[in-house]
């Protein structure tokens, strides 16, 4: 494997983001192999990622203020938010479950938003250090990003199963929709961010 | 055109998807080889022996297991002489009774539609390819498979089922259904299929046969 000490961009080449073919072409021209419009970098990556990240951060507030489900047992129970749900799992001694739910619905989405903001700011400022660390954060986000869906699947499973009338019922609440929106927005935000910008800004001669 | 950029049947240019660094590599890697980016270490391409047949078999198994998962309950709950059960589909549709259609759509897409479409798209491209010809519209279908893949969340769904199981064991008798075991097997097959899939080689084959009309 020979190295050329160059990026595709600086050589006037474009890598197709779908089929990986590298061709001398220009922006928006179709890929000769799979006809996907080619882009040197993901188009308006920073603007789109900022918009999606901010939307996710905003919706994270109602997602945590509104209850996500109501557990009624023997006629008792009230709507609970995500954090109250984690707290009641701890109260009943279900530590491992509490950890899973806390990591999936609090640490992962918040971590993703914080990482995205840090990556965006670092690219804007043209940060030239910590490249490997930032790439590691990006990869971490890609791998664990969609695990926050666990809470949504959990609510659908519990509400379908627990319909025992007076004995026990579980009902979903509006917070689920907001939380779902946060998950979808953070996934799109991570996908619109172009990791090549981290390397570009680091090697920029400014 | 500069001589260095000339790509032939033996050697092609490869740009890292994470950092854009250029590499000159053999068009077909030796079997079992993994190519990593010199600058950032990202995996550029990997080659596995018999990847076409292997991916095809595992994808077919995934699809068969999907029908089993859909036909049987995932969990059954027994409390005070009453019984309820949940399947992949009934769980997804349940929130519709509460007017949360946005969540219904999200769950249907991520736990059912995208994973199934991904399998079907792969089968459509791989089956004829194993037999030595190229299916019509292979470019479009394989590109769609590429778009669906990040939205399939079967693994996350499995974790949701396990958490629900443990959480409910506290208040009632929970019996794992046939679908849970099928789902575990499905997860294994789809992960193995994903690992066996050699996208670069499939695109190369699609490109070769499709020469005349890109």
Image (cartoon, coloured by chain):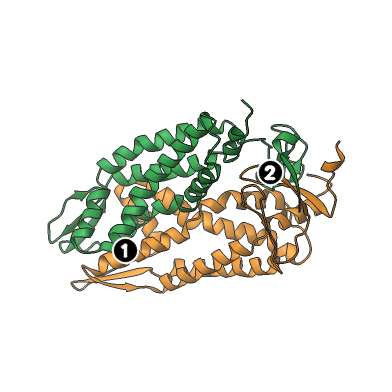
Chain colours: A green, B orange
Q: Quadrant of the N terminus of chain A?
A: bottom right
Q: Which mark is residue B152?
A: none
Measured in 3D between alpha carbons, the distance from the residue under mark 2 to the one under mark 1, in whole angstroms, is 45 Å
User: Residue under circle 1?
Assistant: B164
Q: Is residue B60 left or right of residue A173?
A: right
Chain identity of mark 2: B
Question: In the rendered image, which residue does mark 2 sit on?
Answer: B21
Whichever of callouts 2 and 1 sits on the residue coming sooner in the sequence is 2
Q: Nearer the viewer, residue A126 or B8?
A: A126
Residue drawn where x is 36% and y is 66% of the image? B162
Q: Mark 2 and mark 1, same subunit?
A: yes
Secondary structure type for disc 1: helix
Residue B116 vertical placement versus A138 (above, below): below
Left or right: B9 as drawn, with respect to A159 = right
**Residue B130: where, in percent of width, then height?**
74, 66
Q: Which residue is depicted at the point 47% across and 48% down?
A: A141
Q: Which of the 4 quarters of the picture holds residue A33? A: top right
């Amino acid at each position: 494997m020979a190295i050329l000490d160059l990026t595709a961009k600086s050589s006037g080449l474009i890598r197709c983001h779908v089929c990986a073919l590298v061709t001398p072409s220009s922006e928006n021209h179709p890929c000769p192999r799979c006809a996907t419009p080619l882009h040197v970098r993901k188009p308006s990556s920073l603007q789109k990622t900022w918009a999606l990240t901010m939307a996710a951060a905003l919706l994270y507030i109602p997602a945590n203020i509104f209850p996500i489900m109501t557990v009624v047992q023997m006629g008792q129970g009230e709507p609970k938010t995500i954090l109250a749900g984690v707290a009641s799992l701890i109260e009943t001694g279900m530590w491992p479950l509490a950890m899973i739910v806390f990591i999936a619905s609090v640490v992962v989405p918040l971590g993703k938003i914080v990482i995205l903001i840090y990556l965006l700011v670092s690219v804007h400022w043209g940060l030239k250090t910590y490249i490997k660390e930032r790439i590691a954060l990006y990869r971490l986000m890609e791998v664990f990003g969609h695990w926050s869906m666990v809470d949504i699947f959990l609510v659908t499973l519990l509400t379908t199963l627990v319909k025992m009338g007076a004995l026990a019922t579980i009902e979903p609440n509006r917070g689920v929709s907001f939380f779902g929106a946060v998950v979808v927005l953070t996934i799109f935000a991570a996908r619109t961010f172009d990791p090549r910008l981290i390397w570009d800004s680091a090697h920029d001669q400014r | 055109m500069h001589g260095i950029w000339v790509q032939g049947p033996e050697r092609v240019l490869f740009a890292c998807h994470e950092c854009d660094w250029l590499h000159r590599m053999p068009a077909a890697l030796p079997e079992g080889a993994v190519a990593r980016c010199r600058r950032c270490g990202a995996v550029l391409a990997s080659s596995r022996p018999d990847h076409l047949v292997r991916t095809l078999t595992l994808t077919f198994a995934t699809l068969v297991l999907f029908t089993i998962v859909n036909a049987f309950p995932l969990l059954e709950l027994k409390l005070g002489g009453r019984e309820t059960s949940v399947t992949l589909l009934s769980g997804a549709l349940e929130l519709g009774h509460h007017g949360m259609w946005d969540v219904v759509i999200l769950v249907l897409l991520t736990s059912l539609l995208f994973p199934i479409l991904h399998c079907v798209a792969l089968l459509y491209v791989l089956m004829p390819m194993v037999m030595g010809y190229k299916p019509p519209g292979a470019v479009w279908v394989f590109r769609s498979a590429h778009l669906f893949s990040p939205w399939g969340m079967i693994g996350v769904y499995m974790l949701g089922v396990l958490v629900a199981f443990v959480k409910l064991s506290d208040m009632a008798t929970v019996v794992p259904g046939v679908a849970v075991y099928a789902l575990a097997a499905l997860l294994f097959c789809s992960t193995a299929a994903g690992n066996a899939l050699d996208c670069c080689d499939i695109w190369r084959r699609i490109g070769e046969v499709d020469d005349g009309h890109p």
